[in-house]
Image (cartoon, rainbow, N blue to C red):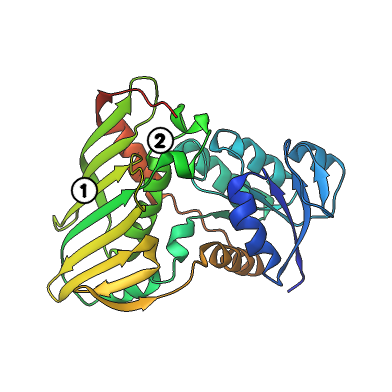
Amino acid sequence: MDIIRLAIVGYGKIARDQHYPAITGNAAYRLSAVASRNAQVDGIAHFPTLEALLEAETPIDAVALCTPASVRTRQARLAMSHGKHVLLEKPPGATLAEIETLKEEAHRCGVTLFATWHSRHAHCVASARRWLTTRQILRVDIDWKEDVRVWHPGQAWIWEPGGMGVFDPGINALSIATAILPRPFHLVEAQLQVPGNCQTPIAASLDFVDGVNVPIHAEFDFRQADTPPIWDIHVETDDGRLSLTDGGSRMLIDGVLQEEGPDAEYAGLYERFAALIARGQSDVDVAPFRHVADALMLGYRHTVEDFIE
């Protein structure tokens, strides 16, 4: 396969910390351009916007959209109309309906569209999925708690409509759960704690069930200050308790470590993107996003103290 000439659009923290090293560490890609108003990469063609990049007819094959979800759909449609393959950071858009238009556009333009869920590429997720296929699941408990001041410093957009609040990290847990559990599940109750000066929740308590009424409970919290983050999923089965900890990088059975590995989530994303392009396919799974939308629609909102960074 030919080298994929890639442009990053939106060169913020996640692009610098995760996308850039994953791209430069994969021989299938060449980083050919960056479109960002406030940042650039030495030695790489730079443009203030995606529009400027495309108008310059810069030789690229694909774009990685690391911009806020509120503008991502417009940018994806523009890139695809120019024949470019598109990788979408999570969440893939601002609404579920937007994603349907993108899927149709990708098909019409004959390009690959990849809605990414980086946590699904954590080291032990595939192993956990295989282990659970032969067990009867009795209960699932998800704890996903971190300090917003550490992981989203100064990012006021996360508290605005579309910013998702605590669901920005919580959707990572849901992306793993939808990957490892053998049956679909749906929300039955949600309690959302929303700061008085914000539009999105700072904490959430969610209860789901699957088709055979297995209970699935999730606790998300953005107020995990002064302690390490908790990114754990525990699955009680008829043959022991599986625990995925540290965001899926460690797997334990009944408390005994079975497997662990390095953080290579974004490397896995770009391997998947290259494979999809080679096969002329798209991957636009919105299951984690659908659960967040359901929680925001059904959740009972409790007003809590204002968030002051």
Nearest the viewer among 301 and 18 is: 18
Nearest the viewer among 99 and 257 is: 257
Q: Residue at x 51, y 30 (%)?
A: 157
> Is residue 307 placed above or below 122 in the rendered structure?
above
Q: Quadrant of residue 74?
A: top right
Instruction: Name the secondary structure under disc 1.
Output: strand
The spot of residue 202 in percent (x, y) is 34, 34
The spot of residue 61 in percent (x, y) is 75, 57
Q: Residue at x 21, y 73 (%)?
A: 255
Determine crowd level at label 2: few under 14, some 14-19, many 20+ residues with C-alpha closer than 10 A.
Answer: many
- The amino acid beneath tag 1 is Phe
Quarter of the image where the N terminus is located: bottom right
- The amino acid beneath tag 2 is Gly
Q: Quadrant of residue 71?
A: top right
- Mark 2 or mark 1: name the one nearer the start of the chain: 2
Q: Residue at x 39, y 43 (%)?
A: 147
Instruction: Name the secondary structure under disc 2.
Output: loop
Q: Determine which of the numbered discs, if any, sits on residue 208 in the image.
A: 1
Residue 112 visible in the snapshot: no
Determine crowd level at label 1: few under 14, some 14-19, many 20+ residues with C-alpha closer than 10 A.
Answer: some
Residue marked by disc 2: 165
76 left or right of 288? right
Nearest the viewer among 281 and 205 is: 205
The spot of residue 32 in percent (x, y) is 80, 56
> Is residue 256 placed above or below 23 in the rendered structure?
below
Quarter of the image where the C terminus is located: top left
